[in-house]
Image (cartoon, grey):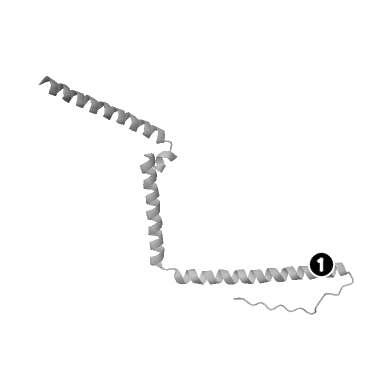
């Protein structure tokens, strides 16, 4: 914590122009408040820096990185699972083409299965 001692050469300013004296007095008061705010902010900043420096270890950083990596992987997996395309496919404009191609393959597969089952039925009925 920082302690700042301010010393004033008197209680108030005596100038020929009272408005100027009042103005200068207000400026000094404002500077005093700013100095106090800066001291508090600096104290808080240094305290937080000390905490972070004492808490930081290589293992902790590696563990945090691993958790972030797992979270990113999980989000990407859900994205791919729900949309059926990768983020790169969407980025490069291949999404519609891939989905169209998959739909065509799905239709062809359904038609092949239908034809196969129909062929089996005809074979069974013929015997």
Could you tell whether 4 is left or right of 122 in the image?
right
Q: Tell me: 15 left or right of 86.
A: right
Residue 122: quarter of image: top left
Q: Is residue 94 visible?
A: no
Q: Position of residue 18 (x, y in %)?
A: 87, 69
> What residue appears at the point 68 percent right and 71 percent down from the top-left corner?
35
Please determine whether, in this image, residue 46 is positioned above or below residue 74: below
Q: Quadrant where the N terminus lies?
A: bottom right
- Which image quadrant for residue 119? top left
* Residue 106 x/y as whole percent: 30, 31
Residue found farthest to the left: 127
The mark total stands at: 1
Quadrant hosting residue 70:
bottom left
What's the residue at 37%, 43% (across, down)? Answer: 80
Kindly identify the residue that appears in the image at 41 percent across and 42 percent down: 88
- 120 or 74: nearer the viewer: 120
| Residue receiving disc 1 | 23
Quadrant in the picture for the C terminus: top left
Residue 77 percent location from the top left of the image: 36, 47
Q: In this rendering, is residue 122 above or below 53?
A: above
In the image, taking residue 110 as reference, residue 90 lies left or right, namely right
Q: Within 10 Å of the Cα at label 1, are there few (<14), some (14-19), or many (20+) other Cα atoms?
A: few
Task: Estimate the x, y position of residue 113 in percent, counting from the top left.
Answer: 23, 28
Residue 65 visible, this orientation = yes
Left or right of residue 36: residue 93? left
Residue 115 drawn above or below residue 14: above
Residue at the extreme front of the image, as rendered: 125
């Amino acid at each position: 914590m920082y302690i700042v001692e301010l010393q004033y050469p008197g209680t108030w300013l005596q100038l020929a122009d009272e408005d100027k004296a009042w103005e200068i007095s207000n400026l000094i008061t404002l500077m005093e408040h700013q100095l106090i705010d800066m001291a508090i902010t600096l104290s808080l900043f240094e305290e937080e820096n000390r905490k972070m420096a004492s808490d930081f270890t290589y293992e902790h950083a590696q563990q945090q990185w691993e958790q972030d990596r797992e979270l990113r992987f999980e989000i990407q997996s859900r994205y791919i699972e729900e949309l059926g395309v990768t983020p790169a496919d969407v980025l490069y404009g291949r999404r519609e083409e891939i989905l169209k191609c998959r739909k065509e393959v799905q239709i062809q597969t359904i038609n092949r299965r239908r034809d196969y089952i129909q062929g089996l039925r005809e074979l069974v009925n013929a015997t």
